[in-house]
Amino acid sequence: MMKIDKKQPVPLILPNPADPRLTQRVSGTDQTGAKVEINVPMERPLTLYLNAQEIVTMMTIGDYPEYLALGYLLNQNMLKYDDIVTEVEYDDDLQVVVVRTAHHTNFEQKLRKRTQTSGCAQGTAFGDLLEAVESVALPKAELRTSWLYQMTQTINTMPSLYLEAGAIHGCVLCKEGEPVCYTEDVGRHNAVDKIAGWMFRHGVTAGDKILYTTGRLTSEMVIKTVRMGIPILVSRSGFTAWGVELARQVGLTLVGRTRGKRFIALSGEERIVYDQNLAYVEEESARHRRKGEGRDDE
Amino acid sequence: MMKIDKKQPVPLILPNPADPRLTQRVSGTDQTGAKVEINVPMERPLTLYLNAQEIVTMMTIGDYPEYLALGYLLNQNMLKYDDIVTEVEYDDDLQVVVVRTAHHTNFEQKLRKRTQTSGCAQGTAFGDLLEAVESVALPKAELRTSWLYQMTQTINTMPSLYLEAGAIHGCVLCKEGEPVCYTEDVGRHNAVDKIAGWMFRHGVTAGDKILYTTGRLTSEMVIKTVRMGIPILVSRSGFTAWGVELARQVGLTLVGRTRGKRFIALSGEERIVYDQNLAYVEEESARHRRKGEGRDDE
């Protein structure tokens, strides 16, 4: 059981590819018909409750269920940042996680009223999410290009589940050029939700952080970053049109296609400080490129 | 409005990167501070109703909303293959699509009973989905390696939205080595759902088909393929442990990490016929590799 006490020291979170619970060895056949063995990431169902209300069943590698639960609820706007969370209970056998709050949440009330007509918590929450995002004011901040290159270099070369078993997403919260919380998951948005939960749990400030994702810069990813109060979002992948539009609307700095020397910013360029001499940045090497290849999506 | 009449000829579906509704030109800044312009894929909300019941709001590029609606409902087991669909109505202004059936569906009944306690259609459907999959018997079929290499070569070199604007998923239904329905979408599972809708709409047989995806071979992807009755699933991406386990349970042929000469099969290897002389297959060229790079996720 996770007690919510923001006075404990903040743990650094980095990938743990050696954890045997996170991957599985399976045998198969290659193109020549020969037997081969490879590692693949685990994927387990985790059912989330907010008090007595069942919310969703997620697919996850299963590390940090408490952070994932908190982050999911926060990023879906089902939990407000000023709701008082009394505990987060995780049951490993049942694969259930329960987030308990001091008072019934606004979302539970709303759900009771709306399910008769709409039926789906996901659908109900979406309009509210957009509203919540539109009223946000993101703080002033800097993205120095020297930090950007330091970050991506560190992330690409650090041991990770992706390098171990492929088919996984990564999300990294950085302060200046340094990773402070690096999460991975098979579930599409679980990696970023775990970061949101970790920040909430430990009272980590958002205004001085940079969020990096291996995934695409879609509207969902932009909404989550803004919900978390982070002013800068970076990816090695591309953009969608609505992701760009939303980012511009709320003044989020959006940097994509970050590979080796290259990147493209499509929103919030005023935060970028071009302090890096590009002559000293290498083009992406084949080894670093591995983190892009194969993580073709899901 | 789409009338359901399975006697019409079956249209070949291929990517249409020239369609101006599917991409948008946006301007930004590159690593040198210079102004650049790039194409990004569109991403629009589409709200789906089953008769009077609101089901979900999806993010989609917006082509083939009718196929997407049908395929989503079928793949979620909210619509059975023997339900009689009377029409599919799409409203471009409201971004709403309504699937109408001759009788109330089993799912609607279930939803009315369950929403009081569970609240979310997504959650409700998941257990049912697993059940539905466990009882499936997939047909005998062949995957000749000559088809496999022909397929991947064709898919990698065919003009597509991905090559035009990046940040998009692709899913291709093939007969032997030939694509017959090639869909793309920003939404994670929309590409495969559109194929399911297209097959249902036109009464296309599944037993002699091969499904190719640019995405990872997760439990969700396996469940959808099995739901559709397709015996063979191929990807250029990797596997998750539960995806492999489910595939083995139902006897789905699962082939991943398909690049150039290489591939790995982790389930249903008895369908593979090694008829291709590997000396005549090229390693993946840098140009073909483009379809893997950058489509880093979701």
Image (cartoon, coloured by chain):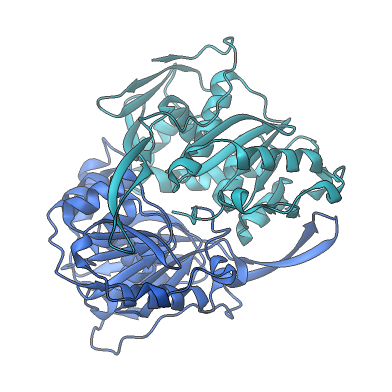
Chain colours: A cyan, B blue
- Residue at 46%, 43% in the rendered image: A125
Above or below — where is A135 with respect to B155? Answer: above
- Find residue A94 and report its horizontal and vertical position in percent: 25, 27
- Residue at 85%, 55% in the rendered image: B33
Q: Residue furthest front?
A: B279
The image quarter containing residue A24 is top left
- Find residue A117 and report its horizontal and vertical position in percent: 34, 49
Quarter of the picture holding the C terminus of chain A = bottom left
- Find residue B252 and report its horizontal and vertical position in percent: 22, 59
Relative to residue B76, is residue A281 drawn left or right?
right
The image quarter containing residue B52 is bottom left
Quarter of the picture holding the N terminus of chain A = top left
| Residue B133 visible somewhere in the drawing | yes
Above or below — where is B87 with respect to A14? Answer: below
Above or below — where is B107 with respect to B260? Answer: above
- Find residue A237 and report its horizontal and vertical position in percent: 61, 54
Relative to residue B24, is residue A59 drawn left or right?
left
- Residue at 35%, 26% in the rendered image: A97
- Residue at 33%, 77% in the rendered image: B146
Relative to residue A242, is residue A165 drawn left or right?
left
Residue nearer the viewer, A13 or A57: A13
Relative to residue B21, is residue B271 drawn left or right?
left
| Residue B76 visible somewhere in the drawing | no
Above or below — where is A90 with respect to A193? Answer: above
Disc tally is 0
